[in-house]
C-alpha cells in the first residue's frame, strides 16, 4: 500500500503509522489508512488481530501510542476535546450496552441533554424520530430488558444517531443477532450511507460484510494486510493469510 | 437624679470596691477553689441506675435524684459552682474522671484501697454489703456456704473480685468455687434472682432498703459479710493532696452541720429500714397502664428520636465517606489504596463498642482538643459510628460498583459524557439497585448498634429504658415499650426499601411490562 507520509486532510479519517501497545504487547502495528466521506468500511480479520483496538482508537476510547490520527483535518491527540470528538464519532457495541435503567427513548436523550444541553422536549422529539428511522418507534417507552436483541441494537444505533455524528463505529453489531435481525441492520446501514454518514464496521459475518462494504480492510497481528473492494477481496485475496482466513470462514 | 441619691450611689460603689478587695485578699485562701471545680462548674460523673444514691426519679431522664446528687449539689454550692451532672455507664465513670471530663465521681461507689491507688477517695456515708436471695432461702453463716452456687453482680463493681478471694479459700479447701455472673445494670442483677437463674446477688444494704417497694416480700437478705472494703461510700477525685483536704473538710462540715444525716434520712439510707423491707407486697403481673404510659412518655419518644437521628446521620456520613473509598479501592494499586484497605480492615475488625470507648475516653488523652465541651457524647457517637459503618459500607459499594457492566462506562464514554456524568447518570443508579438491600440491612443493624452508645452516656432508647427499669423494676413493661419502638423503626425502613425497589422495575422483565401497560 502506498500512503504519503503526511495524513490527508481531505479524508474523513486519515491514519498514518498508528501504533498501540498494551504494556509490551503490540496491538496495532503502524496502521495507515484513509477513509473518505460517506464511505462504508468493513474491518475483517482473525480473532485478536486488533480490529476492536483499531476502531477504539478512532474515538480515543483507547489512546494510541504513536503515529498520526486525523479526523476532518484535525489531529486527534491528548489535547483533543473528547466530548467534541465523541460527538463526531459515534459507536455501537456488540452487546449493545444500552443503559438498562433508562427507557429506549431516555437512552437516546441522555447524552444530548447532558453533553449538548439540549432541552428535554427537543431531545425527546429527535430521539423518537431516530427510533422511527430504525423502525422501532412503538418500543420507545420500553426498558431494554423488554426488547429483543435486534430491537436493542436498533436502539443503540438510534442512540448514536441522536448525537448527529459524522462517523459511526460498529464493533460486531450483528454478532448476537439472528439472520432476520441482521438484514434489518443492513438496511439501516444503507440508510446511514444515504445520509453521508461514514461507517467503520468490524464483523465476522462475511455475507454482511460483502453486502454493506465499499471497501474491506483485512487485518492480522495488529497490521493491515489488504484493503480492497469486497468483490476483489472475496474472489481474489492477495495474501496467503487472507486466503486462509476466508477458507476457514467459509468452511465453518 | 437628686443629689441625695447620687451620694448614695457613690457610697455603694465604694462599698463594692471594698468588698472586692476583701474577697481577693489572701486571708480567704482557706476556701480557694479546688481543682475539681473547673470554669465555675462542678461536673459530676454518675451512673444513675443506683437508687437511692443516684437515679432518675420520674420519666424525665435528665432529672437526676438521690443522695449522691443532693450531696454534689451541696458541694457545688459550697464553692459557688454550677452543678453539672454527666450520666454514663458504671465502666465509663473512672476513665471519664481520668480524662478530665468530670471533676468527681459520686455514684454509690465504695471506698476501696484498690481504687485509692489511682484516685483520692473521701467517704461520706456508711454502708454494708449484703447477700440477697429469693424470699424463703435459708440464711448463711459464712460466704463459703455459697460454694458451687451462682451469684450475680453488677459489672464494673468490685464484688466479683471480692468473690474471687472467697473462691481462693474454697479452692484451697478443695471445694467448688462460687460462680459469678456479671450484668451491666443493678436491675438486671436483681432480675436474675427474681427469675431464679442465680441463687443470690450481692448489693449494698441501702439500695435494698430503697427497693422495698418493688422487692418487698420477694427477696430477703441471707448474709451480711463484714468486709473492710465495703463499709463506706466515697467521693472520688483525681489524685491531689490539697483537693483531698478541701473535700474532706467539706464533708466534715456537712457531717457536723447535720446535712448528711438529713440526706440519709431523706433517702432512707439507714438501718432502720431493714425491718420494713421484709414486709410482704402483692407482686404485679404485666401492668398495661405502665406499658402504655412508657410507650407514650416523652422520655421514650426522645430516646427513640435520638436513636433514629444518630443512626440516620451516622449512616449518611458513612455513605458519603465510603463511596470515594470504594471507587479508589476498585481502581489501580497505589499507596493510597493500601492505606484505605488498612482503614477498612481496622474498622471492620475492631468491635464497635471498643471504637466508641476509644474515641470517647482514649482520644482526649492524646488530643486534649476532644476533651472540650463541644465534644458531646452525640458527636462522639456520630464520629465513631460513621467511621465504623463506612468500613462496612465500603464493601457493599465496592461489590455494587463492580457488578455494573464495564460496557456501561464504555458506552457512556463513547457518547462523550464527562466522568462525573457517567457516575451520576449511568453507574450510580445501577449500583444503587444492587447496594440497596444490603445497605438497608446494614442500617437496621446500625439502628440497634446505637444502643452501645449508652456506655458513653448518650441517652438513646435503650439507655432510657434501663434508667426507667432501674427506677421502677418493671422490666417487662419497659422492655416491651422499647421493643415496640425498635420494631416500628425497623418496619418503617423495610417499607421504605420496598418503595424504593419499585423504582427498579427496569431490572425485571415482568415488572417492567406491568409498568408500561
Ligand atoms: N485492555 C487490554 N489490555 C491488554 N491487552 C489487550 C487489551 N485489549 C485487547 N488486548 C489484546 O490486543 C489484541 C487485539 O485485541 P482486539 O480486541 O483488538 O482484537 P479483535 O481483533 O477485536 O478480536 P475479536 O475478533 O476476538 O474481537 C488481543 O491480543 C488482545 O488480547
Ligand atoms: Mg473485537
Image (spheres, coloured by chain):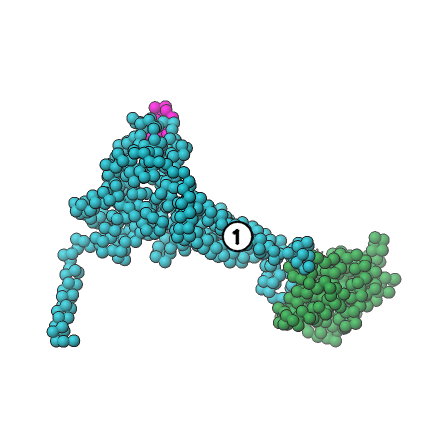
The chain that appears cyan in the image is B
Toward the viewer: B395 or B87? B87
Q: How many labels does the image show?
A: 1
Where residue B63 sits in the image (x, y, percent)?
A: 32, 51
Quadrant where the N terminus of chain B lies? Answer: bottom left
Q: Report which residue position mark 1 lands on.
A: B493
| Ligand number 1: quarter of image | bottom right
- Residue B110 vs residue A34: left or right? left
B174 inside magenta stretch: yes
Toward the viewer: A57 or B81? B81
B186 inside magenta stretch: no
| Secondary structure of the residue carrying numbered label 1 | helix
Toward the viewer: B439 or B369? B439
**Location of residue B418 by image quarter:** bottom right
Q: What span is colored magenta in the figure?
A: B166-178
Q: Please give the name of the residue rendered at 37% of the width and 41% of the height, measured from the top-left corner.
A: B473
Q: Please give the name of the residue rendered at 33% of the width and 36% of the height, measured from the top-left corner.
A: B281
Where residue B134 sits in the image (x, y, percent)?
A: 35, 31
**Location of residue A12 by image quarter:** bottom right
Where residue A190 sits in the image (x, y, percent)?
A: 80, 68
- Residue B76 vs residue B292: left or right? left
Q: Please give the name of the residue rendered at 53% of the width and 58% of the height, measured from the top-left corner.
A: B324
Kindly tell me whether residue B106 is visible in this rendering.
no
Quadrant where the C terminus of chain B lies? Answer: bottom right
Query: Chain under label 1?
Result: B
The chain that appears green in the image is A
Where residue A67 sits in the image (x, y, percent)?
A: 69, 67
Q: Please give the name of the residue rendered at 14% of the width and 68% of the height, measured from the top-left corner.
A: B12
Position of residue A180 relative to residue B71, above or below, is below
Amino acid at each position: 500500500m502506498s500512503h504519503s507520509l503526511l495524513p490527508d486532510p481531505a479524508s474523513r479519517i486519515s491514519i498514518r503509522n498508528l501504533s498501540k501497545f498494551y504494556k509490551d504487547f503490540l496491538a496495532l502495528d503502524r496502521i495507515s489508512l484513509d477513509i473518505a466521506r460517506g464511505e462504508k468500511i468493513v474491518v475483517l480479520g482473525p480473532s485478536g488481530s486488533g480490529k476492536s483496538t483499531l476502531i477504539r482508537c478512532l474515538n480515543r476510547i483507547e489512546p494510541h501510542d504513536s503515529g498520526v490520527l486525523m479526523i476532518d483535518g484535525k489531529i486527534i491527540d491528548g489535547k483533543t476535546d473528547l466530548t467534541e470528538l465523541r460527538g463526531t464519532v459515534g459507536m455501537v457495541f456488540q452487546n449493545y450496552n444500552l443503559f438498562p435503567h433508562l427507557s429506549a427513548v431516555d437512552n437516546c436523550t441522555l447524552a444530548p441533554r447532558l453533553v449538548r444541553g439540549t432541552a428535554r422536549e427537543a431531545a425527546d422529539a429527535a430521539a423518537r424520530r431516530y427510533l422511527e428511522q430504525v423502525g422501532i418507534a412503538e418500543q420507545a417507552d420500553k426498558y431494554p430488558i423488554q426488547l429483543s436483541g435486534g430491537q436493542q441494537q436498533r436502539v443503540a444505533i438510534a442512540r448514536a444517531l441522536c448525537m448527529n455524528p459524522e462517523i459511526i463505529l460498529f464493533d460486531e453489531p450483528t454478532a448476537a443477532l439472528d439472520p432476520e435481525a441482521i438484514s434489518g441492520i443492513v438496511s439501516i446501514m444503507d440508510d446511514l450511507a444515504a445520509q453521508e454518514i461514514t461507517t467503520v464496521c468490524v464483523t465476522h459475518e462475511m455475507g454482511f460484510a460483502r453486502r454493506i462494504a465499499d471497501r474491506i480492510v483485512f487485518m492480522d497481528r495488529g497490521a493491515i494486510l489488504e484493503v480492497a473492494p469486497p468483490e476483489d477481496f472475496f474472489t481474489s485475496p492477495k495474501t496467503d493469510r487472507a486466503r486462509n482466513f476466508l477458507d476457514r470462514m467459509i468452511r465453518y | 437624679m437628686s443629689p441625695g441619691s447620687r451620694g448614695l450611689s457613690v457610697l455603694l460603689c465604694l462599698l463594692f470596691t471594698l468588698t472586692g478587695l476583701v474577697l481577693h485578699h489572701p486571708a480567704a485562701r482557706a476556701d480557694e477553689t479546688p481543682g475539681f471545680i473547673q470554669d465555675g462548674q462542678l461536673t459530676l460523673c454518675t451512673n444513675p441506675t443506683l437508687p437511692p444514691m443516684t437515679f432518675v426519679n420520674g420519666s424525665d431522664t435528665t432529672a437526676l435524684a438521690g443522695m449522691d446528687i443532693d450531696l454534689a449539689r451541696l458541694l457545688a454550692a459550697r464553692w459557688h459552682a454550677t452543678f453539672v451532672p454527666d450520666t454514663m455507664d458504671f465502666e465509663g465513670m473512672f476513665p471519664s474522671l481520668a480524662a478530665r471530663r468530670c471533676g468527681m465521681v459520686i455514684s454509690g461507689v465504695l471506698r476501696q484501697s484498690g481504687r485509692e491507688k489511682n484516685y483520692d477517695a473521701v467517704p461520706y456515708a456508711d454502708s454494708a454489703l449484703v447477700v440477697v436471695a429469693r424470699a424463703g432461702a435459708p440464711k448463711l453463716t459464712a460466704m463459703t456456704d455459697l460454694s458451687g452456687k451462682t451469684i450475680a453482680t453488677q459489672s464494673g463493681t468490685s464484688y466479683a473480685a471480692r468473690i474471687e478471694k472467697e473462691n481462693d479459700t474454697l479452692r484451697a479447701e478443695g471445694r467448688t468455687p462460687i460462680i459469678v455472673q456479671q450484668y451491666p445494670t443493678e436491675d438486671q442483677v436483681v432480675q436474675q434472682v427474681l427469675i431464679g437463674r442465680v441463687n443470690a446477688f450481692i448489693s449494698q444494704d441501702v439500695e435494698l432498703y430503697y427497693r422495698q417497694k418493688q422487692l418487698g416480700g420477694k427477696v430477703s437478705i441471707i448474709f451480711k459479710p463484714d468486709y473492710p472494703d465495703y463499709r463506706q461510700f466515697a467521693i472520688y477525685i483525681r489524685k491531689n493532696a490539697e483537693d483531698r483536704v478541701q473535700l474532706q473538710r467539706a464533708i466534715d462540715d456537712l457531717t457536723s452541720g447535720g446535712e448528711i444525716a438529713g440526706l440519709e434520712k431523706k433517702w432512707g439510707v439507714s438501718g432502720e429500714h431493714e425491718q420494713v423491707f421484709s414486709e410482704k407486697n402483692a407482686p404485679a403481673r404485666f401492668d398495661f397502664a405502665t406499658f402504655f404510659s412508657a410507650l407514650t412518655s416523652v422520655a421514650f419518644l426522645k430516646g427513640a428520636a435520638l436513636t433514629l437521628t444518630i443512626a440516620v446521620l451516622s449512616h449518611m456520613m458513612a455513605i458519603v465517606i465510603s463511596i470515594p473509598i470504594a471507587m479508589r479501592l476498585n481502581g489501580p494499586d497505589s499507596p493510597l489504596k493500601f492505606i484505605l484497605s488498612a482503614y477498612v480492615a481496622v474498622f471492620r475488625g475492631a468491635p464497635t463498642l471498643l471504637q466508641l470507648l476509644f474515641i470517647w475516653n482514649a482520644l482526649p488523652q492524646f488530643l486534649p482538643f476532644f476533651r472540650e465541651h463541644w465534644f458531646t457524647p452525640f458527636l462522639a457517637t456520630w464520629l465513631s459510628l460513621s467511621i465504623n459503618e463506612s468500613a462496612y459500607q465500603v464493601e457493599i459499594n465496592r461489590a455494587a460498583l463492580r457488578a455494573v457492566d464495564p460496557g456501561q462506562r464504555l458506552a457512556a464514554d463513547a457518547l462523550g459524557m464527562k466522568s462525573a456524568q457517567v457516575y451520576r447518570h449511568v453507574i450510580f443508579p445501577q449500583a444503587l439497585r444492587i447496594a440497596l438491600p444490603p445497605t438497608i440491612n446494614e442500617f437496621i443493624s446500625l439502628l440497634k448498634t446505637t444502643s452501645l452508645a449508652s456506655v458513653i452516656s448518650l441517652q438513646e432508647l435503650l439507655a432510657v429504658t434501663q434508667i426507667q427499669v432501674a427506677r421502677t423494676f418493671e422490666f417487662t413493661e419497659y422492655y416491651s415499650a422499647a421493643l415496640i419502638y425498635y420494631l416500628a423503626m425497623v418496619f418503617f425502613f423495610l417499607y421504605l426499601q420496598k418503595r424504593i425497589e419499585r423504582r427498579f422495575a427496569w431490572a425485571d422483565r415482568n415488572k417492567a411490562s406491568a409498568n408500561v401497560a
